[in-house]
Structure formats: C-alpha cells, structure tokens
Amino acid sequence: MWYTDGAAVFNSSNLSVWPLILTINELPFSERYKKGNILVPAIWCGPVKPHVYILLKPVYPDLLKVKKGIPINVFKKVENIVRGIIIVGTADLRARALMLNLVAHNGECGCQKCFQPGEGRVGCPLVRVFPFQPNNMASRNDKHFAKDGLYATSLRKAYMGVKGPTLLSQLSLFPIRGTGLDEMHMIFGGCGKTLAKLILSEEKKKPSVQHF
C-alpha cells in the first residue's frame, strides 16, 4: 500500500517534504504499521509539490524489478522468486491528483471516480461544485484512465481530467480502482462532518452550496 503527503518543514518557509510511504500487506495488521516495517523509498523536499515522475523515478527501477520477481535463496539451498506489486493506496485530494497525474480537485473533470466536469461557484470561480446530474454518472475506470493519459500526451494538455500517463500505472494493476478515497478528510473532517452539522444542528437554516 502506498501513501504520500506534504508536510511543512518550517513555519517561516514554504519548504515542504513529501515522503513516499509503502507498507507490506502480507504482514499481520498488528505488525504492518510498526516503525521498523514501514518502507520510505523516496523523499522529496522543495518549495513546491513534486511531479509524480520526479517522486517515483528514483525508485521506479527497483520497484519494477520487485514486480517482475527477484530470486531469493532460502537457507542457501532453495531459490524462490519473490514478487511484490502495489495493490492499493490513498492520500488526500492534492496528493491523489499528484500520484495519478490528474488535474486538481477544483479543475474541470477533477473527480477521481467520475467524468462530471463540475462548474465554478457563482461569485467564487476558484471553488468548483458538482451539481447532481443523474444522466451523466459514468464512472472513471482504469481502462479509460490509461487511454485518456495517452491522448492527453498527444494533445499536450489535460483530457477528461488526466494530464498524462503516470509511473504508478506501471507499478499497480489498478491505479484508479486501487486508489481509495481518504476517509479522514472526506468523512471525519470534510463533507461528512459538514453534512452531519447541517442535519443535526438545531439552527433552522436552509442548506445551500455555500455551506460547502
């Protein structure tokens, strides 16, 4: 499983650190997230967030070798082929867009799971809202994702929210299906929290898009 996010280094500087964190699924859950079992194959430090190519390029050859299989001698007698592949991952909105090479969440077709373009909020165009469109609910899948990435490369601009191919596609079987939504921001600190306040609040206010 992969995870990444940016963290500020100093309060007085815009310098941030982006570690790439990997965990081993085959380890028992009680051991999986212990400090000694967490892998940090890459760290980016800079004033802006890195491009996915820059973050993954240094470790891509090694991760690709592990995906294809590496021979390991067990007790110096039996040689086994050990393989490893990235099956799932998650991050917040900004980091997911980075890893999947998608436009930001406030960009056109910025949703990871569907193709709805969204629209700018009246009076605040930098905020993008996604009105419910029952006749336009097509889901984004891995096949569409790969095809749109190649087409975006030929156009030299984003297409259907995809800015181009990502190295993650070469390391993961299902980059879209295998990238989960971040429950901390989506549920406990984001839309779920806001909806709970609107539903349970004693204040009689008519909900509107401005609440979001």
Image (tube, rainbow, N blue to C red):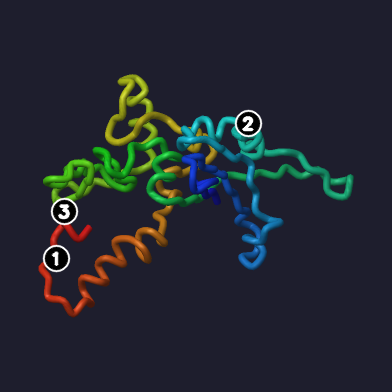
The quadrant holding residue 146 is top left
In the rendering, which numbered label is found on residue 207? 1
Question: Are there few (<14), some (14-19), or many (20+) residues within 10 Å of tag 1?
Answer: few
Q: Nearer the viewer, mark 1 or mark 2?
A: 1
Which tag, 1 or 3, sits closer to the chain's start?
3
> Is 202 or 161 nearer to us in this picture?
202
Going by the numbered disc 1, the residue's amino acid type is: Pro
Identify the residue position indicated by label 3 in the image.
Answer: 132
- Assign the C terminus to one quadrant of the image: bottom left
For the residue labelled by badge 3, is the local secondary structure a helix, a strand or a loop? loop
* The residue positioned farthest toward the bottom in the image shown: 202
Which tag, 2 or 3, sits closer to the chain's start?
2
Residue visible at 57% across and 44% down in the picture: 19
The quadrant holding residue 182 is bottom left
Going by the numbered disc 3, the residue's amino acid type is: Phe
For the residue labelled by badge 2, is the local secondary structure a helix, a strand or a loop? helix
Question: Are there few (<14), some (14-19), or many (20+) residues within 10 Å of tag 3?
Answer: few
Residue visible at 54% across and 48% down in the picture: 2
Question: How far across and down, in percent of the image, does residue 156 sit?
Answer: 33, 21
> Is 106 or 13 nearer to us in this picture?
13
Question: In 3D space, how far apart are the residues under numbered discs 2 and 3 (Cα atoms)?
Answer: 43 Å
Which tag, 1 or 2, sits closer to the chain's start?
2
Q: How many marks?
A: 3
Question: Are there few (<14), some (14-19), or many (20+) residues within 10 Å of tag 2?
Answer: few
Question: In 3D space, how far apart are the residues under numbered discs 1 and 3 (Cα atoms)?
Answer: 15 Å
Going by the numbered disc 2, the residue's amino acid type is: Pro
Question: How far across and down, in percent of the image, does residue 142 sit?
Answer: 39, 41
